[in-house]
Image (cartoon, rainbow, N blue to C red):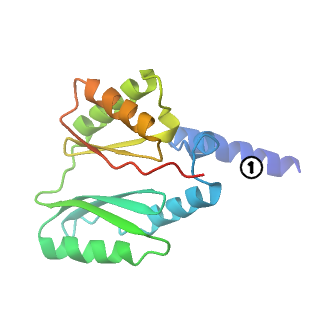
Amino acid sequence: MNNIFRLIISLVIASIFAGCTTIATSGADRRPLGTQIDDSKIDFGCPSSSSDEKFRIQCLTYNYTVLVTGQAADQKKIDQLIAEVKKIENVKKVINRMTVGAINDDISGDAKITADVIEEIIEEEGVSKFHVQVYTELGVTYLLGSLFDEEAQAAITAAKRSTKLKKLEPLFQGPVY
């Protein structure tokens, strides 16, 4: 019993240090726990980026909808990658935002935008950060989550207050209960 407790504590600490907030936020997430787990499985099932094949792909899944971002050398490769994502078990919808072009290795600017938008959302009354996922790719900030109309508007208003924001694309769904 003592070893199991130590293992659980070790996993929690490792998750925190790895930047994983799933354990801490799953209770505040509106999606059922099973949906959260399925979404994580979808993310793990997405193709991996490859410098040999000259593409970078990032999948962010929310309620079985997959936002796919990244870059590839040509449209044919993007189409192939999107077809692979659509075949993953439980995927209901794919939003393709991949672009043809050079691979974006410098994500520091995007990370700063994301952090600034999250800060604005945290300070906004009427919406919880736990209900909004924020991701930025090549200066485009995506907002995902299950929100009521008033909450969605509050999140959009907050994001637009960010001085670092370049372009905003809200991809909200209605609340899931």
- Number of marks drawn: 1
From the viewer's perspective, is residue 157 above or below residue 46?
Answer: above
Left or right: 72 with respect to 159?
A: left
Residue under the point 18% across and 66% down = 54
Vertical arrangement, residue 174 with respect to residue 153, above or below: below
Q: Out of 8 and 112, give the one closest to the viewer.
A: 112
Callout 1 secondary element: helix
Q: Which residue is mark 1?
A: 7
Outermost residue to the right? 1
Pinpoint residue 132: horizontal percent, then vertical percent. Answer: 44, 40
Q: Is residue 160 above or below residue 55?
A: above
- Tell me where residue 106 sits by quadrant: top left
Residue 119: image location, x then y, percent: 39, 25
> Could you tell me which residue is drawn at 42 percent across and 51 percent down?
173
| Residue nearest the viewer, comparing 67 with 124 | 124
Q: Is residue 67 left or right of residue 16?
A: left
Disc 1: CA contacts within 10 A as few (<14), some (14-19) or many (>=20): few
- Residue 43 horizontal/vertical position (percent): 44, 62
Q: Residue farthest to the front?
A: 149
Quadrant of the image occupied by residue 56: bottom left
Residue 56 relative to residue 20: left or right: left
Left of 131 or right of it: where is 100?
left
Residue type marked 1:
Leu
Q: Which residue is located at x 30 percent, y 37 percent? A: 111
Task: Give the percent coordinates (x, y) of residue 73.
Answer: 12, 67
Residue appearing at x 20%, y 70% in the figure: 78
